[in-house]
Amino acid sequence: MSSLEQLRTDFQAALAAARTADDLQATRDRFVGRKQGLITALLKGVSSAPVEDRRALGSGANALKEEFEEAWQARAAVISAGAPVPDALDVTLPGRVPRIGRRHPLTQVRERIETIFASMGYAVIDGPELEDDWHNFEALNMPPEHPARDMQDTLYLGAPMPAADRKRHATLLRTHTSGMQIRHMEAHPPPVRVIAPGRVYRRDNFDATHTPMFTQVEGLVVDEGITLGDLKGTLNAFAERLYGAGIKTRFRPSFFPYTEPSAELDVSCLNCDGAGCALCKQSGWLEVLGCGMVHPAVFEAVGYDAERYTGFAFGIGIERLALRFYGLDDIRMFYENDLRFLEQLPL
Amino acid sequence: MKVPLSWLREFVDAPTDPAQVAARLAACGFAVEGIDAEVIDFEITANRPDCLSMYGLARETATAFDLPLKPLGATSRAPAAAEAKTTSKPSVPVSLDDDGCKRYALAVAAVRVGPSPSWLTDRLHQAGIRPINNIVDVTNFVMLEMGHPMHAFDAMKLAGPEIRVRKARRGERLTTLDGQSRTLDESMLVIADAERAVAIAGVMGGAPTEVSASTSRIALESAWFEPASVRTTSRRLALKTEASARFERGADIDAPPRAIARALDLFRSLGAGDLSEPIVDAYPVARTPRTLALRRDRLDRLLGTAVPGADVLRILTGLGFSPAPTADGWAVQVPAFRVDVQREADLIEEIGRHWGFDRIPATLPALRTPPPPHAPEVTRGRLLRNLLTGAGLQEAETFTFIERAAAEPFAGPDGLVAIANPLSEKFAVMRPSLLPGLLDALVYNRHRDATSVQLFEVGSAFTPRGEVRRAAWVLTGARGEHWSESSGDVDIYDAKGVAELLASALDLEVIAEPADDVPWFVKGRSARLRTRGEGGIEIARVGQIRPDLASARGLDAGIVVAGELDLVPDAARSQAGDANRRVQPLPRHPSIVRDLSLVIDERLPAEKVRGTIRRNAPATLVDVREFDRYQGAGVPQGSVSLSLRLTFRHAERTLTDSEVQQAVEAIVSALTAEHGVKLR
């Protein structure tokens, strides 16, 4: 065996036996150490070899040194992979997550609805929660003693307060956000395309399915040439954006004093897709909102030309939608603010 | 309204499958509550009193299925007798002393009171009405069949005998058929005899004149009362009846004599009695039939589709209207029973719902003008919610009306806004602040193992002067939780920091001052934030909630810090101005920083120190910031060491050490002169 082959066998054995960084360093010193390295010595010996052998010996020794370096690096990589890194941190411990809160579920659903309508060119408006009789009832075709006032059992204030427009007195807690739309029409000529969200109040029981305070999003469109077909198209688009493209809709005639014709929008049951289940009480449909063409008496009340303009309006109860979105069966959960519930919501 | 299909089919050859009839009528606006065997329970909207009857719904069914409607009284039960005669010299004279009654028909009949046959009691049971005797049962049957309520008095028990429709006297009493003794007032319309009230008009009859087994003569009332009058009375007495439900929505003024005739037919066929003299029909001002113009163009434009003229005629005629063609559409006479049809749009709805909303093509309205921006309050609300959730607070929604005990500690000097008719004591007053609701929500979570709770709400609060929008927050427990360190519990600086964050987001420069007069906060642990400058207004209060208030609401341990920011309109405006914000050019010259460690009186507010520094510094002072506050060894008793970092920078050139040194010396001497501070 030539000395080159012997050296190769030796360093291979030495590297295979190396277990630690110290072993590695010792192997390096033994073979390629500047002073006593065996391969180093071989290379140093090249110049003193006979002239005819120099070339072969030189290239063989250089190749062996490269071979050693390669094998040493490979072994070093294996050893360092298993070796503890000094000052290593336990990176499996939890990070410092910045504290973050969530928007309330009613806010999330409300903003979802606002976003859909905003994309169709609606402006979101705001208004007072304490209303005067005119804006809550009379301007909406509900004169005093109108039986429809019973449909919205009203909470009244103990004493009148200055109303938002300072001309009237607030006497009641708004039963719908329609008063905001009346105010908007009183202040702006047509065309109108607005969304009116907010809390509303009715003298209703507080149980799993009722609450005396709930959240509404109402919408209003007024322009020349607005038709019941436009109402259908708009609310179909809304239902598809809210529930997905496969949703089916149905418009049933209904009654509201401020719209004529009036309708209710149902969507195919989200649970059974129309087959009939407990959620939809076997009907295959879920009620989503009330809507209709604005009653001409409403236009007359705000000084719009009821011959020239037509319009549509709709009103959505947020709590009921949110119950279905989150798979809940008790409306009171929205007002308990239990963190164990709220922290399950999306960010 | 419970409707047996077999009863409906007495008037129209409708399909025999209840589900089919229910579905078709639902599509015409009569929502179905349920179906039980052959009885369909329809929800009748408040505008359709005419459909609180079998015949009314039969008319809708006939139109919906395009079938003929049989005339009322054509049934096998009781064929109609010859037209009843009326008289001017009755044995029981009728006088209308109040225009709350527009028509009053009365028949006097000799009767034999007894049980009703089973076909009649079955019908009543199906419709949900308890049978009593043949006389009362017939009046109820007629009410269900044709929708017109009637009442039978025992004629022998009427003083006079006479009938007088008048307002009740104040304090007049009447025991009604339900056995309740009721006190009446002048707003209520009653039926009286010569001496006293015997019935509450349109609501309920009186017990003293009730038909009993011994009754031999009845006075049968079939009248028309003003809806508003019946509604007021019914509400005042908290007494809702089958009769009041129909009258307050609007009965058919043509119906009173027809209903009497129908009842008499039934009495005769049951052998229960017969008319003993001609019918009285007091109807001083006969109704003029209403005729409405229906324009072809308007019909198409409102529905967005062109319903063929033949269908318009079919639908209107089927529903009892009398349309006659005109140049631009039709002149439509409205039947008396359709009290809801007042104008053209109402006719268009009739056509739309029977043509079918599902047949109207869905379109989208053109957007002819650019949409306006959202209300500033809406944009501001979103900004606040984003900031507060980003800052780690969870949004809550608490009730706007709360119990008085929870509200009172937070009431302002003007007091609370009370609700006149609250649902319960828990919802008695409008919240004067968002804090009591948030405090309760915090306590609720503490009781459910949450140790660290940080909640906020954006909403309205109420004082007798009006409604104000606010954002409020409550914090308790650890600031953050991590295995690496204890970050400590929240204190008032956490609550104040939230206020400072929001103020800066709303572009408001604020200064703080102690606020020991805020009654719900601990003295010495509360501050008021004002906008800086002349005429600065208070915009927020922050502090520690008084422990006795927190424990009264159930807090077991720990402290609660809180804040509330007023969302004044000015703040909304500055937010809307965001789009025009200009940024300052970045500084081109380095800044020089000087730290000052001052020993000051512990009662001297940092705001005063800062104020003195600013007033006595050159314009090159760009920032003052506290970075340490220390009390203890090395600092005299009653004093505190406060360290501030001053940053100087000139916009045009590099400052020299000596000019900064000069500035600092001027500041220190001013601090010494004004507050007696010493350098440490």
Image (cartoon, helix red, strand yellow):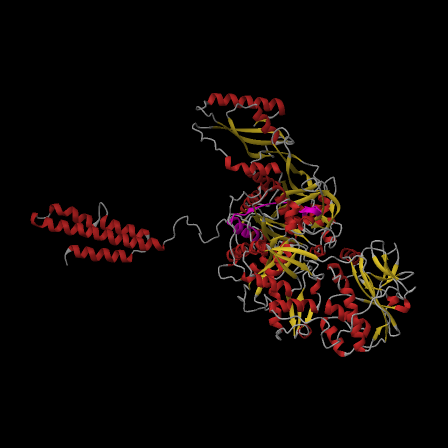
Q: Which residue lies furthest to the front in this view?
A: B327
Residue B216: image x %, image y %? 88, 73
Number of numbered tags placed on the structure image: 0
Is B29 in front, or is B482? B29
Is A100 in front, or is B36? B36
Q: Does the rendering let one see residue B66?
A: yes
Instruction: Check the image and report above or below for A197 versus B239.
Output: above
Q: Is residue B177 shown in magenta?
A: no
Side of A15 where B445 appears, left or right: right
Is B179 in front, or is A97? B179
Q: Is residue A132 shown in magenta?
A: yes
Q: Does the rendering let one see residue B1?
A: no
Is B304 in front, or is B623? B304
Instruction: Check the image and report above or below for B57 versus B520.
Output: below
Q: Quadrant of the N terminus of chain A?
A: bottom left
Which region of the structure is painted magenta?
A109-135
Residue at 71% in and 65% down: B52
Side of A124 where B658 appears, left or right: left
Residue B24: image x %, image y %? 60, 68
Residue at 82% in and 72% down: B135
Residue A28: image x %, image y %? 26, 50
Task: Please tell me in which quadrant of the rendered image residue B510 appears.
Answer: top right
Q: Which residue lies furthest to the left in this view?
A: A52
Residue A205: image x %, image y %? 70, 58
